[in-house]
Image (cartoon, rainbow, N blue to C red):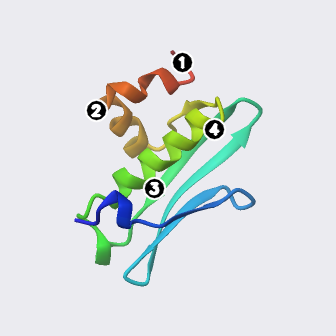
Amino acid sequence: MTNTSDLNVQHDLQRGRFVATVDGHDCVLEFKLSADRVAMTAVRVPDAVGGRGIAGQLTRHALDWARSEALKVDPVCPYVKTWIKRHPDYQDLLADS
């Protein structure tokens, strides 16, 4: 498993995504920003580097960013929605709460 501290996540605000390159593969969490909300629309981790917890680390990183920006989160992506359900300390970020 890749440790969170080992994952170098880049924030590409222009393209609406967080990117971490692992073993030459781009792992991406896509989002759409509007006013005081961020819709997290997709998490993509190539099969070649799957199973290392990368999607969860990207999600945590993106949610921590949303919190620091005082944004509410709309978890459009099923993975992000499930991840938040499993981590109650992030449920206060939900746009519906």
Among the 4 quarters of the image, the one containing residue 68: top right
Q: Which one is nearer the viewer's eye here, 57 or 29?
A: 57
Mark 2 vs mark 3, CA separation in Å: 16 Å
Q: Are marks 4 and 3 in contact (CB under 8 Å)?
A: no
Circle 3 SS class: strand
Q: Residue at x 61, y 49 (%)?
A: 31
Q: Position of residue 67 (x, y in %)?
A: 56, 33
**Gap between marks 3 and 1 measured at Cα:** 21 Å
- For badge 2, the amino acid type reads Arg
Spatial separation of the CA atoms under disc 4 and disc 2: 20 Å
Question: What is the number of the mark on residue 43?
Answer: 3
* Rendered view: 75 above or below 6: above
User: Amino acid type of disc 1?
Assistant: Asp
Label 4 vs label 3: CA separation? Answer: 14 Å
The residue tagged 2 is: 86
Which amino acid, by three-letter code, is at mark 4? Val
Q: Residue at x 37, y 61 (%)?
A: 5
Q: Where does label 1 land, which residue?
A: 96
Give the residue pinned by disc 4: 38
Quick check: marks 1 and 2 in contact, CB under 8 Å? no
